[in-house]
């Protein structure tokens, strides 16, 4: 890896167009409130908190485009950060692609960050950007696993016990988070080349045969997926308020 730091402009694409089926009925997940503020606004602020980020592209639910635009107009961002809102697609992958299509020239580092990870600390964002600046083409923040993981065979009859196929060595597994950081041209090539359905962007770069590296993630970068995650997110925000003396 080269340790030469190159001048760079960084943008973040935030896929926020999902419904949030696992969270249960209600507004699209990114628009649900945490401590009175929509999850998406927390996520945008978390990205804009990094001094390196000059543009945030929000990929919104198509029917919520106007609502998302006025939300972002209403919640002030730092002067240095521009934002754009574009409509999303049917899959996360498609939504990210639509966000990438909206990037202006002059951006050479792209982060992709789930709106569903509203509480990621700025240090994690900066660590990812730093690793791309230092020469990595793809960087993922990740944590070791607490649980042992089993690989199973899909049950032949739904509801029946599933046979275990293997137990991967836990110490070598990582649970990956976002923001994932990329050399812009590499990520665009990955999205143009890889057509398999994937659940993260780095795996598309892996499929190009390129090197993806892991940096330390953070507990507070967890993804709000199920109802209990809302309880945890509120608790994290309450702890931050207490620590800030509000
Ligand atoms: N996402 C998106 N477009 C889609 C699907 C997902 O932009 N068509 C975004 C979500 O808004 C979220 C991120 O991708 O910020 C991660 O996806 P996930 O946590 O799975 O969110 P949802 O797909 O909304 O949730 P669920 O799978 O429970 O429906
Ligand atoms: Mg989903």
Image (tube, grey):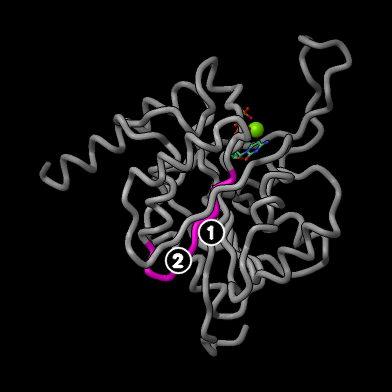
**Left/right of residue 136 with respect to residue 12 in the rendered view:** right
Alpha-carbon neighbours of circle 1 within 10 Å: few (<14), some, or many (≥20)? many
Disc sitting over residue 53 in the figure: 2
Residue drawn where x is 64% and y is 58% of the image: 102
Residue 65 seen from this side: yes
Q: Quadrant of the C terminus?
A: top left
Ligand 2 image position (quadrant): top right
Residue drawn where x is 48% and y is 55% of the image: 217
User: Contact, CB < 8 Å: mark 2 with mark 1?
Assistant: yes
Residue 178 seen from this side: no
Mark 1 — residue? 12
Disc 2 to disc 1, how far (Cα)? Answer: 7 Å
Instruction: Residue at the far left: name it.
Output: 245
- Vertical comparison of 196 with 82: above or below: above
Give the x, y percent position of residue 85: 55, 48
**Left/right of residue 166 with respect to residue 26 in the rendered view:** right
* Residue 185 position by quadrant: bottom right
Instruction: Residue at the far bottom: name it.
Output: 4
Q: How many numbered tags mark residues here?
A: 2
Q: Main secondary structure of the magenta part?
A: strand
């Amino acid at each position: 890896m080269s340790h030469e730091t190159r001048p760079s402009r960084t943008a973040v694409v935030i896929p926020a167009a999902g419904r949030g089926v696992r969270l249960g009925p209600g507004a699209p997940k990114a628009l649900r409130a945490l401590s009175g503020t929509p999850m998406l606004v927390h996520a945008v602020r978390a990205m804009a908190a990094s001094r390196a980020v000059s543009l945030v592209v929000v990929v919104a639910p198509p029917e919520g485009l106007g609502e998302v635009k006025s939300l972002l107009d209403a919640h002030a961002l730092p002067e240095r950060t521009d934002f754009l809102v574009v409509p999303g697609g049917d899959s996360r992958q498609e939504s990210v692609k639509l966000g990438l299509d909206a990037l202006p020239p002059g951006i050479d580092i792209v982060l992709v960050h789930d709106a569903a990870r509203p509480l990621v600390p700025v240090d994690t964002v900066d660590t990812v950007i730093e690793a791309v600046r230092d020469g990595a083409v793809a960087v993922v923040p990740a944590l070791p696993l607490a649980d042992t993981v089993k690989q199973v065979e899909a049950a032949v009859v739904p509801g029946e016990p599933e046979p275990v196929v293997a137990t991967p060595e836990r110490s070598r597994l990582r649970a990956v988070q976002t923001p994932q950081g990329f050399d812009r041209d590499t990520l665009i090539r990955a999205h143009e080349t890889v057509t398999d359905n994937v659940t993260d962007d780095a795996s598309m770069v892996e499929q190009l045969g390129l090197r993806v590296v892991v940096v330390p993630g953070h507990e507070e970068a967890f993804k709000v997926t199920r109802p209990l995650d809302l309880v945890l997110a509120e608790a994290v925000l309450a702890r931050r308020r207490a620590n800030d003396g509000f």
